[in-house]
Image (cartoon, grey):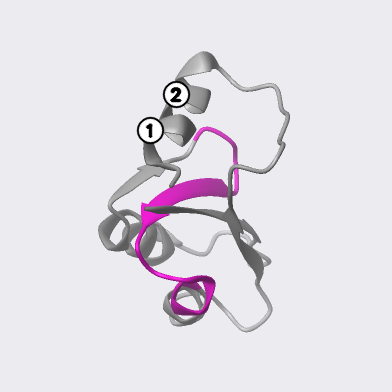
Amino acid sequence: MKIMLITYDLNKPGKDYDSLYLVIKSTSKAWWHYLDSTWLVATQEDVGYWQRKIREVVDQNDHFLVVEITKMPRQGWLPQKAWDWIKKYES
């Protein structure tokens, strides 16, 4: 299982982004969304797949980044349940 980090800057105030959230939730095996504009998703798909899926539902002037995270060194200040989720789904 891979974990993808999806983060975005949506540049259209007031736009309904429920379709973006639905794509993320329904396409991943599991997801975690503790930080604003940032999701972690457990998936078998690669970054290109996620780029295409997100591109279908955001505006042309929106920005986003999809990165596969691995077991490389990482640090942060997250609740323990976030670290537990990452450990559960990392390959």
Please tell me whether residue 47 is drawn above or below residue 72 in the rendered image: below
Verify CB contact (< 8 Å) between mark 2 and mark 1. yes
Residue 79 belongs to magenta span: no
Q: Which residue is mark 1?
A: 88
Amino acid at the residue labelled 1: Lys
Q: Which residue is mark 2?
A: 84
Q: Residue 76, image x and y in percent?
A: 71, 27
Residue at position x 44%, y 77% in the image: 49
Q: Residues within 10 Å of mark 2 (few under 14, many from 20)?
A: few
Amino acid at the residue labelled 2: Asp
Q: Residue 86, image x and y in percent?
A: 48, 35
Please give the label number shown on residue 53: none
Residue at position x 59%, y 36% in the image: 35
Please tell me whether residue 55 is drawn above or below residue 74 in the rendered image: below
Q: Residues within 10 Å of mark 1 (few under 14, many from 20)?
A: few
Q: Residue 50, image x and y in percent?
A: 46, 71
Q: For mark 2, give the secondary structure.
A: helix
Q: Which residues are magenta?
A: 34-50
Residue 90 occupies quadrant: top left
